Amino acid sequence: MDKHLGLSGLFSDKPFEFKFGIRKGDARKFFENTADHDSIIAKRKEIIEYHTKRHVFQEPAAEAAVEELTEWAGISAEECPELGLHWQQDFIVLLTDNRGKEVFQAGVVCFPSSWRPEEKIGLPVYEIHSPVPTLNERLGEQIDKFLRAIEPGVAWERLNWGLSRSPELNQHPECEIPPLKPPYDLNQVWVRREDQVLFRLPKTRALIFGINILNISVAEIAADKDGRNRLKMAVETMPDKIAKYKNVQESREHLLGLLKD
């Protein structure tokens, strides 16, 4: 995604309200290469080579699903690492367990947003990230029902965002990303946009969860009056639990001061 388009649909002009925000999407378009493809693949290659166990996963139960996914991607391969170096986007393969939940069984997650993918094998999709206030507590069963109803040929997309003190794509906790604590200026903080796609494979019925990360400088956002006002509204009005989840809580007042007109 072009960084100039990165703000599209990200912030509302109304007080913050957490929504699941699912919409019809296009899985093949989601996994298209961008202008940064080669440089991103180079980063992925290094991560996969040196930190395989915390970024690359493939349980035996997912073998057929991974093979089908490589066919869908148009490459000749049978394992996740090849896909991890074909796509610049992260992906997770979910299979239905005996509880009827779609659980993490394979994938390549080179660019986690401050969570440990290696600790999430066997968990449902909505528990893969750090628990999301209101999402897990109030919407978990509804999400299970929605996921079970996804049929091949249809893709669904949503987006999420948080704030970070670093523009690094890989923000695994072991990378020791500096915390977002004052003092800092607008050139030292980024909105970390995370676009997500969900679609189902026809043969194995595996559910695929794609993740695409885009870092947007808050200084660039603040240079645009509308962007500044929308970000300020979101930071100012979000509940404390959501602010903590989005890495805003500890520096909310400092950031609002920087975003003043």
Image: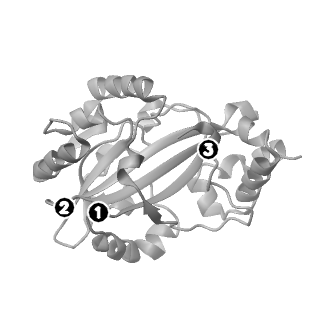
In this rendering, does residue 101 appear at all? Answer: yes
- Specify whether 67 is left or right of 156: left
Which of disc 3 and disc 2 is earlier in sequence?
3
**Which of the 4 quarters of the picture holds residue 182?**
top right
Which of disc 1 and disc 2 is earlier in sequence?
1
Residue denoted by label 2: 202
Return the x and y of residue 178 as percentages of the image width and height.
58, 32
The crowding category of the residue bearing disc 3, from other C-alpha atoms within 10 Å (few below 14, some 14 to 19, many at least 20), is few
Labels 2 and 1 touching (C-beta < 8 A) = yes
Residue at image position (38%, 22%) is 42
Residue denoted by label 3: 5
Amino acid type at mark 3: Leu
Near-viewer residue (117 or 102): 102
Amino acid type at mark 2: Pro
Residue at image position (74%, 66%) is 14
Return the x and y of residue 116 as percentages of the image width and height.
37, 44
Label 1 SS? loop
Amino acid type at mark 1: Gly
